[in-house]
Image (tube, rainbow, N blue to C red):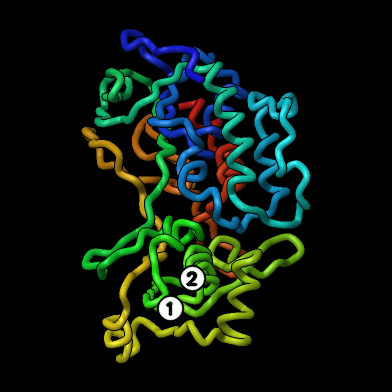
């Protein structure tokens, strides 16, 4: 897959850290924008489409197939129209949703394709250091210099301090086959949260007949579709998760599922009787390296800038948007990352 071992002696113009969907988009749009392929260093430990390709393949997505297809064709340098393989996603209804493996597979083809064009380092960034000429990236494979660095490093499920144990990882709860191996009929499992990830965990547990407790902070929220916009586009339930939650948590609640508000006085007693705990309460930026910089690192959610010549994109660095009713949300999703990148990349080129 990897066609070039990059030189550590020559500085790069761009370094892209991460090869998930956001990293793919960045490399693709840099090439579309005229960047010299040999001026781009792409770093990732696996080049397997990030967590999407390694952790979440069997999870039902909440993005319409049509938007996934738009992503695949959004960069000329992806050359997806020349792909000799006809992936299943090409034949699915555009208005429906799908398992995430259906988009991960064509993205893997694109990743392999892009790896033939740019300088590739298969490794992990350990230290990122600000230098006069740009940024120094210390990796497993050597030390590199780049004038501009773009972080597309993803995010991990948030687990609060003092989390209850034994903890069941979210990726296990969202993978039905792994979940079957991780729990037994005698378990009583608590799931914290009420967004898409929590609902996926709950319907997997329900399918196994496991007694569950859903601990929530906010009521169930559903995306509402209007002619030219979506209310709760990023925080509301969509697709199968929305249908299942409405039917089995509100209209005709399951007997094996108890819901309790986190501030309910009875919550502590209920939780103490549980045998495992799943936290589906959001994601937090993945920290994969130490940073040595003379300036504080803060993220501008309108420009993608973290520090001079250091930028971010993806679930760890999303765009902040306010809808027509004044609700602020972070815009998360493959097509949303691409659309955001198209607006801000000219600023990065000009810097």
**Is 343 drawn above or below residue 165 in the view shown?**
above
The answer to whether residue 106 is above or below residue 329 is above
The answer for how far apart the CA atoms under marks 1 and 2 are is 7 Å
Q: Quadrant of residue 325?
A: bottom right
| Number of residues whose C-alpha sits closer than 10 Å to that of mark 2, classed few (under 14), some (14–19) or many (20 or more) | many
Residue 194's x, y, as percent? 48, 72
Q: Residue at x 28, y 18 (%)?
A: 142
Say whether residue 152 is left or right of residue 342. left
Which residue lies most toward the bottom here? 265
Question: Between 250 and 187, which is closer to the camera in this rendering?
Answer: 187
Where residue 162 sits: x, y (%)?
21, 67
- Residue 89 appears left or right of 282: right
SS at badge 2: helix
What residue do we see at 46% from left, 16% from top?
119
Q: Quadrant of residue 79?
A: top right
Does 195 appear above or below 117?
A: below
Pick whichever, 86 or 333, lies toward us: 86
Q: Which residue is mark 1?
A: 212
Quadrant containing the C terminus is top left
Front residue of 211 and 171: 211
Q: Which mark is residue 123?
A: none
Please state the horizontal and vertical placement of residue 22, each as a whole percent of the image. 51, 39
Q: Residue at horizontal 44%, vertical 61%?
A: 179
- Contact flag, marks 1 and 2 (Cβ < 8 Å): yes
Residue identifier under label 2: 205
Residue at image location 51% in from the left, 71% down from the top: 208
Mark 1: secondary structure: strand
Where residue 273 appears, as percent x and y from the top left, is 29, 83
- Number of numbered discs visible in the structure rendering: 2
Mark 1 vs mark 2: which is more N-terminal?
A: 2
**Label 1 Cα neighbours within 10 Å, binned few <14 / some 14-19 / many ≥20:** many
């Amino acid at each position: 897959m990897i066609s070039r071992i990059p030189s550590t002696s020559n500085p790069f113009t761009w370094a892209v850290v991460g090869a998930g969907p956001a990293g793919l988009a960045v490399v693709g749009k840099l090439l579309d924008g005229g960047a010299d392929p040999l001026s781009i260093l792409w770093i990732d430990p696996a080049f397997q489409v990030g967590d999407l390709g390694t952790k979440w393949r069997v999870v039902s997505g909440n993005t319409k197939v049509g938007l996934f297809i738009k992503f695949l064709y959004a960069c000329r340098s992806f050359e997806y129209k020349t792909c000799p393989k006809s992936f299943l996603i090409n034949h699915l209804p555009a208005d429906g949703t799908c398992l995430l493996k259906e988009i991960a597979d064509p993205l893997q083809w694109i990743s392999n394709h892009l790896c033939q064009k740019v300088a590739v380092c298969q490794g992990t960034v350990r230290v990122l250091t600000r230098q006069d000429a740009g940024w120094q990236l210390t990796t497993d494979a050597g030390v590199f210099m780049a004038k501009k660095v773009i972080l597309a490093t993803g995010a991990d499920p948030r687990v609060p301090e003092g989390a209850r144990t034994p903890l069941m990882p979210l990726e296990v709860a969202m993978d039905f086959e792994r979940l079957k191996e991780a729990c037994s009929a005698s378990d009583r499992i608590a799931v914290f949260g009420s967004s898409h990830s929590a609902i996926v965990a709950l319907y997997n547990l329900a399918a196994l007949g496991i007694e569950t407790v859903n601990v929530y902070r906010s009521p169930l929220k559903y995306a509402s579709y209007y002619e030219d916009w979506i209310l709760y586009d990023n925080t509301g339930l969509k697709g199968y998760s929305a249908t299942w939650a409405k039917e089995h948590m509100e209209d005709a609640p399951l007997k094996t599922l108890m819901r309790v508000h986190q501030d309910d006085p009875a919550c502590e007693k209920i939780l103490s009787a549980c045998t495992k705990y799943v936290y589906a309460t959001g994601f937090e930026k993945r920290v994969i390296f130490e940073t040595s910089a003379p300036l504080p690192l803060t993220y501008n959610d309108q420009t993608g800038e973290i520090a001079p010549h250091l930028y971010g994109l993806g679930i760890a660095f999303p765009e902040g948007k306010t809808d027509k009713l004044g609700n602020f949300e972070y815009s998360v999703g493959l097509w949303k990352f691409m659309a955001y990148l198209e607006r801000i990349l000219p600023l990065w080129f000009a810097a």
